[in-house]
């Protein structure tokens, strides 16, 4: 078992898109899509179906070894074996792609510092620019339209493909290479040549609302994010309630999700999960703040380790969950390295919330389902939970 989250799986739709992650586009290139290419509904495969379609690591390693002996590509052989399994979460990655994913979990990525989203008319628009990034230095602003990348028009293309173009080839060191981005702002049309760089992501942001509410937003569970959450809770002014915003959080390091749970729980069970039939447990540690009113805000982009955290807080009566049904990704993947350095990530089991609920294919139903103005509704709910003193 690797040291990273066995629940969080980067899903590559196809090789040309490099890492097309449902793991929040912010970790791909600093490009958050604002939506997912897979809807939560279409992804609600049952745990039983997943178990029937599961493929064993031994099978993939055997296919890869036979391909190597025949002078063929082990990675391509492994991909064929995985594709026949019908397991939507198992996948095979090149050595460079997997290294890129692990760097993302460390809170780093190679890119230009643009977050982007696709509008209804198919246009790609900049939704955020990371301060100090190549994009910020070039004067690119939120709201600018991305027309092309290296001469290729991007209108109508999935954001994940645009992301892949912006960040370069995962199998080569893209840091230091350049990318030419065609832009539009009002009547102005121009191009910028940006030099890709290693950038850091702030996966946890904290802000205080006027009504005595501290909002802790976790974009992904990257390295040390659990410590940041615990520090934010400790440093929140006395009397503040907490809104834990997990919208669009598609997972990360399970140890960090457990650390985040520990900020709000006084020990106890966070989740159980099985690996090849053997049950394992995850417990909160230390003495978290169990008195502050807490609302967890979720949506269809909340998945994997973020669902694990939500389920723990809901089952143990620690938080009121507000928003829309979560994605329903509760399967466990673990990696194995193949002879050519590529990595197969295969499903080995599923996790359950403290009360025994299975999340995979079902998601978590909020206590209060809200689609519009969810943050405002969360504030209203929080105000009704009482003074923590």
Image: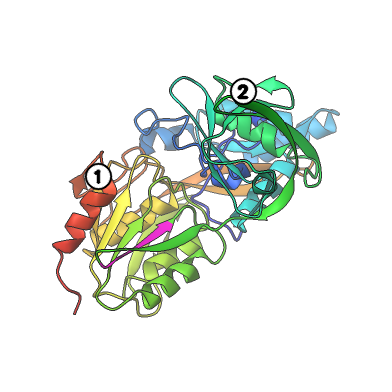
Q: Residue at x 53, y 32 (%)?
A: 125
Q: Nearer the viewer, mark 1 or mark 2?
A: 2
Q: Is residue 22 above or below residue 186?
A: below
Q: Is residue 342 visible?
A: no
Residue at (45% x, 34% y) in the render:
36
Res. 53 in view: yes
Please indicate whether residue 101 sits to the left or right of residue 143 in the image.
right
Q: Position of residue 366 (x, y in %)?
A: 23, 47
Secondary structure of the magenta portion, mostly? strand
**122 in the magenta segment:** no
Is 223 or 72 nearer to us in this picture?
223
Q: Quick one: which residue is furthest to the right in this view? A: 71
On residue 316, the disc is none
Residue on which the image places disc 2 = 154
What is the span of residues highlighted in magenta in the rendered image? Answer: 212-217
| Total numbered labels placed on residues in the image | 2
Q: Give the vertical position of 288 relative to 7 (above or below).
A: below
Q: Where does the C terminus fall, quadrant-wise? A: bottom left
Residue depicted at x 54% and y 67% = 224
Circle 1 — which element?
Answer: loop
């Amino acid at each position: 078992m690797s040291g990273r989250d066995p629940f969080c799986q980067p899903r590559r739709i196809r090789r040309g898109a490099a890492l097309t992650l449902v793991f929040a586009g912010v970790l791909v290139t600093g490009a958050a899509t604002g939506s997912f290419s897979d809807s939560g509904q279409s992804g609600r495969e049952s745990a039983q179906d997943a178990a029937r379609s599961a493929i064993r690591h031994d099978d993939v390693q055997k296919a890869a070894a036979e391909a190597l002996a025949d002078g063929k590509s082990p990675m391509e052989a492994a991909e064929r074996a995985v594709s026949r399994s019908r397991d939507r979460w198992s996948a095979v990655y090149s050595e460079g792609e997997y290294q890129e994913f692990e760097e993302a979990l460390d809170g780093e990525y190679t890119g230009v510092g643009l977050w982007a989203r696709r509008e209804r008319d198919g246009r790609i628009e900049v939704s955020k620019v990371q301060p100090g990034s190549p994009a910020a230095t070039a004067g690119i602003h939120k709201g600018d339209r991305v027309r092309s990348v290296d001469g290729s028009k991007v209108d109508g293309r999935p954001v994940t493909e645009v992301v892949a173009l912006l960040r370069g080839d995962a199998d080569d060191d893209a840091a230091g290479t350049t990318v030419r981005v065609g832009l539009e702002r009002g009547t102005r049309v121009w191009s910028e040549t940006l030099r890709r760089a290693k950038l850091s992501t702030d996966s946890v942001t904290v802000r205080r609302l006027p009504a005595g509410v501290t909002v802790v937003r976790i974009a992904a569970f990257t390295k040390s994010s659990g410590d940041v959450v615990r520090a934010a809770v400790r440093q929140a002014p006395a009397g503040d309630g907490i809104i834990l915003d997990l919208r669009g959080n598609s997972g990360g390091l399970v140890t960090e999700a457990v650390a985040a749970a520990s900020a709000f729980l006084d020990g106890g069970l966070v989740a159980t999960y099985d690996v090849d039939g053997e049950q394992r447990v995850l417990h909160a540690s230390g003495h978290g703040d169990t008195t502050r009113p807490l609302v967890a805000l979720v949506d269809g982009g909340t998945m994997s380790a973020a669902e694990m955290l939500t389920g723990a807080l809901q089952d143990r009566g620690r938080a009121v969950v507000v928003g829309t049904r979560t994605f329903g990704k509760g399967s466990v993947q673990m990696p194995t390295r193949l002879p050519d350095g590529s990595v197969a990530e295969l499903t080995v089991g599923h996790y359950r919330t403290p009360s025994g609920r299975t999340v995979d294919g079902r998601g978590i139903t909020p206590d209060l389902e809200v689609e519009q103005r969810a943050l405002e509704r969360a504030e209203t709910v929080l105000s009704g939970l009482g003074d923590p003193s």
